[in-house]
Image: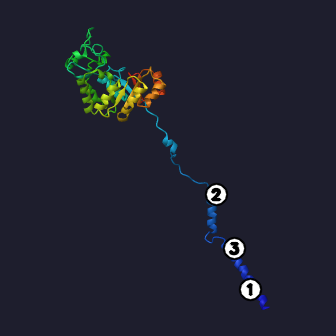
Amino acid sequence: MKKFISLLLCLASLLSCAACGGQAAVDPTVTQAQTKTAETTAEAPAVTTAAEPETTAAQAAEPEEPVLLYQAHRGVSTDFPENTLPAFQGAIDQGYKFIELDPNFTLDQQCVLMHDSTINRTCRNADGSSLGDAAIALGSIAYADLLKLDAGLFKGEQFKGTKVPLLSEVAELVEGTGVALKLDNKIQNYTDEQLEIIFTLAENSKADIGFTCKDIGFVTRVAERLPGVTIHYDGPIAPVVLKKLAPIAETHELYIWVGINNANETICDMVKEVGHLGIWTLSTDEQLEKAIALGAEVIETNGELKPAK
């Protein structure tokens, strides 16, 4: 009988342990309320706040669309008398990046701006009368006498009183504007003394003054005389020439110019391997579209084409 009772007590103990083991499988720290909360949270949709779309790595790596730059030939010569302060101020106001202009010399070696070697086409007497048919060379007249003439009337009465400016005056005009000057390649024809006048002005001026060269020899001369100056090359384009220009592009800002009528994909692609591609002189939208398609970085115009502001 005692053995039977002991057996019953052992059986009861085993059943009690089994019950305790089953409860131990459930985490005693998780209450029924917590379980209900977790279930509700899992069923509820996630709430997000509006945020700016992130820039992907691909988008960040995309290059910016290049901006086409414009050069005003002799200033904005469609709207103003060429090579005068109004034409240069017009280029600044209208958003041109470069101003092409023509340094020239008077009898007393003042560096003025005039395209022609004679003054008859663009100058008049103070009363508006013509200077006559006999050609008057710029180099035969002193600067003080040149100032007595009118350089605006040939373009219109509204420009009466305009004078032939000095190169130094234009350099002062563009200082701090972000507009650069581009001296025409006619400077290659000047004497060493005259070139030194221009070199010295460019060296001492705060203006960005670039030099146009039509052969490698003059490119080298300018580069050596004015380290870091902007150089514009508008001579013949050939692989051998571009190879000689390549070292210049490593030390100077180099623009290589191609005429719009001669510009084609082969030539322009060769140019872009060495320097910045410039195309001149454009006057129509069709020419502009062609230049853009060829990858021009800067185009020259008399003013028929205006930069986008």
User: Residue flagged by tag 2: what amino acid is it?
Assistant: Glu
Give the quadrant of the N terminus: bottom right
Q: Which label belongs to residue 37?
A: none
**Residue under label 3:** 22
Q: Secondary structure at mark 2?
A: helix
Q: Which of the two discs, 2 and 1, sits closer to the camera? A: 1
Q: Residue at x 77, y 86 (%)?
A: 7
Place residue 140 in its image quadrant.
top left
Distance from disc 3 to disc 2, alpha carbons, whole Å, reads 29 Å
Q: Earlier in the sequence, mark 3 or mark 2?
A: 3
Image coordinates of residue 125 in percent, x first then y, are: 24, 13
Q: Earlier in the sequence, mark 2 or mark 1?
A: 1
Q: How is the image coloured?
A: rainbow
Q: Secondary structure at mark 3?
A: helix
**Left or right: where does residue 172 sit relative to residue 76?**
left
User: Residue flagged by tag 3: what amino acid is it?
Assistant: Gly
**Left or right: where does residue 304 sit relative to residue 185?**
right
Between 283 and 19, the one lying in front of the other is 283
Image coordinates of residue 176 in percent, x first then y, are: 30, 34
Between 117 and 20, the one lying in front of the other is 117
**Residue under label 1:** 9
Crowding at mark 3 (Cα within 10 Å: few <14, some 14-19, many 20+):
few
178 to 103, vertically: above or below: below
